[in-house]
Each structure stands twice: as structure tokens, then as C-alpha cells.
Amino acid sequence: MLNKIIIVFALLAILLMVAMFVGEMATESQLKKDVKTLFSLSQNISNKTYSSEQLEQLPEPVRRYFRYSLQENQSYISYVRLIHDGKFRIKPGQKWMTIKGEEYFTTERPNFVWFGKVPMFSAKDIYFNGEGNLKVKLLSLIKVVDAKGEEINQGELLRWLGEAPWFPTALLPSENLRWEEVDENSARVILKDGNISVEGTFYFNQEGQIIQFKAKRFKDGVLENWSGFYHDYGEVEGMKVPMHVEVVWNLETGDFKYVDFTVKKIEYDVPIKF
């Protein structure tokens, strides 16, 4: 009898391993399709170049930022891909989980795909042509979150804006992005994508680095204060970008930091999946 029980459990374990393998293969295949779709949604704008003359009408801290982060005649970035590690948690008081992720962006129109894995779970966050979708799976098999809708769309566009310091030319003024003066160390940015408009405030130090971003983002149906912090700037292809970011919900019950990512690799204008 005992032998039969052991055999049954062994077979169940094998079936689970096979199912997990199949699930991971299906997830990877879909991710490749999503990244391919992402890069097809936005045009190559790398024939455009940055000039300091573009800064004349911008608020002083924004001018300081571009003088710090860009070189004269810097080509506009069209496509971005990066790999990060770090830690993540879902709710206050929870232990941090290690995370590894990869993310892909377009800039001519704001779109992205992010895929991350923590122990037991994987997540995929997408923003395509004004529509966002967050999916979370257990063991790459069981869907436990499939969030979409207007509030998700707003949050995903804010995420793109908050992560734009990784590709600074996307923050240059354009038909869909404009800056407004606040004070000598901060400026408001307004971004439009189709029928969606989001805004937030970037904060700058005297060197010209972006050090913080603040905005109102939906959480559980309520607009809450949401902040990003930027550290450890490094040079990538002639541009200065932050290599360490933290993200915090500023709730009435207190600040809740839930993201702490370190960029391990970032590449521009290589529109294929890692």
C-alpha cells in the first residue's frame, strides 16, 4: 500500500513538472510574440537629433537635466530593452521577494512590455496603444490576476513616464509631451497618448539628475500618491541614466515601498527580444 502511495505521489510530481515546463514554454513563446508586436507599433525616430536649442523655452531644472543627461547631436532613442534584478513585495509587512525581469519600450509612441519572475509567480505588464494589462500566474500555469480597464491604462502610461529617465530623449518636448515650471528644483510634465493624459512632477538635484517623480495613480480604485526614486547614475551610449530605482506608494497609513530594482543591462535601438 505504501509503495502505491509513493508511486502516485511520484507520478503527480512528474506531471506537475511537465505541466510547469509546458507552461513556461508557452509563456516564453507568448512573450516573444508580445515583444515583436510592441516593436511593430512604433516608428524609428533615430534620424532625429537633440540640440541644446530645444531647451530655450523649458523650465530651468529641465534644462539642467538635459544638459547633464544628453550630448549635443544625440540621436533620439526609438527602442529600448533592459534586464534588471532586485526585490519586490505586494503588501506592507510582507517579506521582500527576489525578482528578475526584462523590459522593452518604444518611444515614438509610449508602449512597453515588462516580464518579471519571483519565486512561484511570474508577471507580465503590457501597455499597447493606450491599453494596459497586468497578468500574474502561479507556477506559469494558473492565472491569478488579469487586470485591465481605464484605471489600469492610466497607471501603465504613468509607469512608462516614470521609467522614461532610462531613455532621456523621450522626455524632450514634443507634440504629446510638455513641461511646466514649478520651482528651481522641480517641473511638471504632461503626457498625452491618444485619449489618455497623465501628469506628474519630476524633482532634480543641482547636478541635473532626476532624483524623484511624484504622481497620482490608481490603487484599488482610489487615486493615491505614488513616487519613484532614482539613484546611481551611469553612462550608457553617451547618456546618463539611473541604474537603481525604487517605487513607493505614499498612503495615509504610511509609505509602502514595493519595488527596488537595479538595472543590469540596458540597450537602445535593438528591437528584438533578449
Image (tube, rainbow, N blue to C red):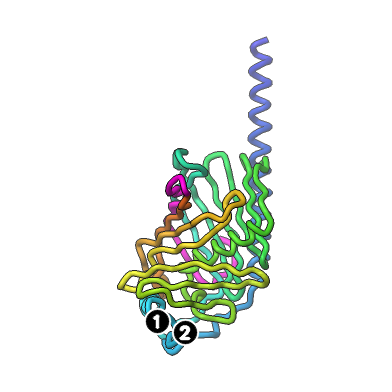
Query: Does the stretch in magenta take in 262?
Result: yes
**Label 1: how many Cα within 10 Å (few below 14, some 14–19, many 20+):** some
Q: Is residue 7 left or right of residue 177?
A: right
Residue occupying the point 58% across, 55% down = 218
Residue occupying the point 41% across, 85% down = 72
Residue occupying the point 36% across, 61% down = 231
Which residue is identified by label 1?
71
| Residue 134 to residue 4: above or below | below
Q: Amino acid at mark 2?
A: Tyr
Residue 170 drawn at (x, y percent): 51, 75
Q: Which residues are magenta?
A: 252-274
Q: Is there any visible trace of residue 32 in the rendered image? A: no
Check contact, mark 2 vs mark 1: CB within 8 A: yes
Secondary structure beneath dot 2 equals loop
Query: Does the stretch in magenta take in 261?
Result: yes
Which residue is identified by label 2?
50
Q: Residue 40 or 214: which is nearer the viewer?
A: 214
**Label 2: how many Cα within 10 Å (few below 14, some 14–19, many 20+):** some
Q: Is residue 246 left or right of residue 190?
A: left
Q: Earlier in the sequence, mark 2 or mark 1?
A: 2
Residue 190 drawn at (x, y percent): 54, 73
Residue 105 drawn at (x, y percent): 57, 66
Magenta span: helix, strand or loop, mainly? Answer: strand
For the view shown, which residue lies furthest in the bottom direction? Answer: 53
Residue 43 numbered mark, or none: none
